[in-house]
Amino acid sequence: GDGGASLPGVPGEILDRAAALQHQHGSAYDMPYGTDLFRKAVVEDYWKLTPASGLGPENVLATVGGRDALVRAYDAMLALGHGRTGDLIVVTRVPWISYNWGPYGVGANVLLAPGSAGDGWAYTEDALQACAESAARLGRKIAGVIITSPDNPTGKDLSPERQAALGKAALRLGAAFVLYDWMYHTVTDHAPMDLNAFAAAFDAGERPRLMFLDGLTKSLGASNIRSAHLIASAEVVRYLTARASHAVIPPFYGTAVAMAAYQAGFLEVARAINEPTSASRAVMRRFVAEHGLTAILDQGYYAFLHVGKWLEKRGWKDSEPLGEYLAEQHGLAVVPGAYFSSFGGEWIRFSYATPPARTLGAARRLMEGLDALVAG
């Protein structure tokens, strides 16, 4: 899942332009939200936000990658939501590891929503209702709901209309905030999210309760650049800016890389990641079909593969030892689904964010490893 290692990463000319911006800008302290230059680039060059969206530069906060943005968001959800420590962050049944761990560090609890493997554990309105009822039984309230599309680890992709419907349902059921994690939204076979159109689906009372996360880690393979941004209400951004004054202030260079990419035409710059990943996605879909595998394989970086029958034959209770076996015996890196939650115990996350030939080679090595596992 590291496009900076398995793919070309950020183009050299973008890194050079960012270095020139750093040189021009100097090395004095910046504001805790980043810089006005970065905010302007996010609003005008990247999202191309219009006044009708209700969003402008004052709604943008630079962060040190996606995890930093999430921890800040959890903090704001607790403080500005119901104002209670210990309230709940709702995530899907098989969530990204950092969704499972991050909230506890700022005093939140995590609630896994009901879901089924056949639908990639995607949220439903009934599942969100069940979360609200569970929260009430626990004496808690829902501080935030995280909606990720395409998803990590499953790759499950939701239409903009479905994402909006789920967000509106969560707010209606009492969630203080809904955060949309769109870190993979440009790594797809379809158009990226249109924040102007998406914001229009919500009324004036709902919009201040929305947050949007995006960044360069996946879209440009900028894994060690640590550049992301959070878009939220002015109240949330002011709160987080004040907190950042005494915590983490984003370095200028990461925002400079983003500005350079945005101003050069982001989708064109991102082709170095998106085109090989898209080609590999097609290769992987054919491979899955040819081998009769059960997979969640929508968009983003990942295929989530069911390996239950091999685990059962081997006598392993979940996929954790399989990850170690594949790495040590077959030179293949996968992430056991058991690491995400017990509900992913019979699954593995397989990254196809590599050139197509390498993806096909890795898929073949996976099958060789699985077959050798039960033959031995």
Image (spheres, rainbow, N blue to C red):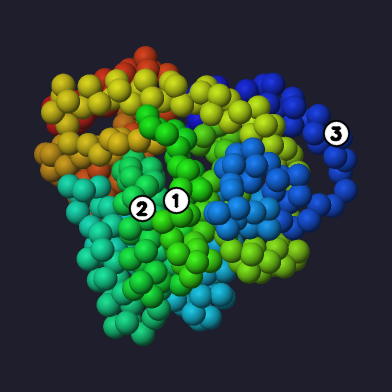
Please tell me which residue lies in front, 77 or 139.
Answer: 77
Q: Which residue does the numbered mark 2 point to in the structure image?
A: 163
* Amino acid type assigned to the residue bearing label 1 in the image: Phe
- Name the residue tied to disc 1: 198
| C-alpha separation, residue under disc 1 versus residue under disc 2 | 9 Å
Q: Residue at x 53, y 81 (%)?
A: 83
| Upstream in sequence: badge 1 or badge 2 | 2
Q: Is residue 13 visible from the viewing direction of this image? A: yes
Disc on res. 23: 3
**Which dot, 1 or 2, sits closer to the camera?**
1
As measured in the structure, the alpha-carbon distance from the residue carrying label 1 to the one carrying label 3 is 37 Å
Question: Looking at the picture, does residue 320 appear above or below residue 106?
Answer: above
Q: Give SS at disc 1.
A: helix
Can you give x and y, in whole percent of width and height, for residue 312 in the image?
Answer: 13, 43
Pointers 1 and 2 in contact (CB under 8 A)? Answer: yes
* Secondary element at image label 2: helix
